[in-house]
Image (spheres, rainbow, N blue to C red):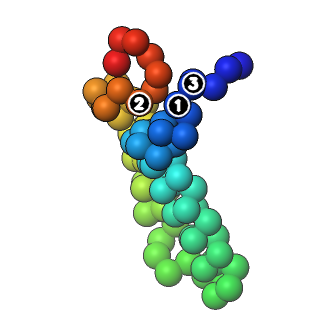
């Protein structure tokens, strides 16, 4: 596996990375709140729905043209 030459720009600007980080933060916050308070402040189904939508959005957003940041010649 070889990283693209401008991997820092990809991490900073790619929507797929932003969505994946947001999903991870959402999970971390929900788990932290559940551990501290002993209960989630909202029904768990909403967390499942939000995570499902974010996870489904990652490959869809990857197909949308973005600034040419991935290092590929065809983007």
- Mark seen at residue 6: 1
Name which residue lies at 60% across and 79% down.
33
- How many angstroms separate mark 3 from mark 1 (CA)? 6 Å
Along the line of sight, the residue nearer the viewer: 45 or 13: 13
**Quadrant of the image occupied by residue 16:** top left
Q: Position of residue 25 (x, y in %)?
A: 55, 62
How many residues crowd around disc 1 within 10 Å: few (fewer than 14), some, or many (20 or more)?
few
Q: Is 44 situated above or below 52? A: below
Q: Which residue is mark 3?
A: 4
Q: Is residue 33 left or right of residue 48?
A: right
Are the two marked residues, 2 and 1, in contact with CB atoms closer than 8 angstroms?
yes
Are the two marked residues, 3 and 1, in contact with CB atoms closer than 8 angstroms?
yes
Q: Earlier in the sequence, mark 3 or mark 2?
A: 3
Q: Is residue 21 left or right of residue 62?
A: right
Q: State the SS at label 1.
A: loop
Q: Residue furthest front?
A: 5
Q: State the SS at label 3.
A: loop
Q: Position of residue 32 (x, y in %)?
A: 65, 75
Q: Is residue 41 left or right of residue 68?
A: right
Q: Position of residue 5 (x, y in %)?
A: 56, 25
- How many angstroms separate mark 3 from mark 2 (CA)? 9 Å
Instruction: Specify whether residue 63 is in view.
Output: yes
Q: Earlier in the sequence, mark 2 or mark 1?
A: 1
Q: Is 49 situated above or below 43? A: above
Q: Which residue is mark 2?
A: 69
Name the quarter where the C terminus is drawn: top left
Name which residue lies at 52% across and 63% down.
26
- How many angstroms separate mark 2 from mark 1 (CA)? 7 Å
Name the quarter where the N terminus is drawn: top right
Q: Is residue 28 left or right of residue 1?
A: left
């Amino acid at each position: 596996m070889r990283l693209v030459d401008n991997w820092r720009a990809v991490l900073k600007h790619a929507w797929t990375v932003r969505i994946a980080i947001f999903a991870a933060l959402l999970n971390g916050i929900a788990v932290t709140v559940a551990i501290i308070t002993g209960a989630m402040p909202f029904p768990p189904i909403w967390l499942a729905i939000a995570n499902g939508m974010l996870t489904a959005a990652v490959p869809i957003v990857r197909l949308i043209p973005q600034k040419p940041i991935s290092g590929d010649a065809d983007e």
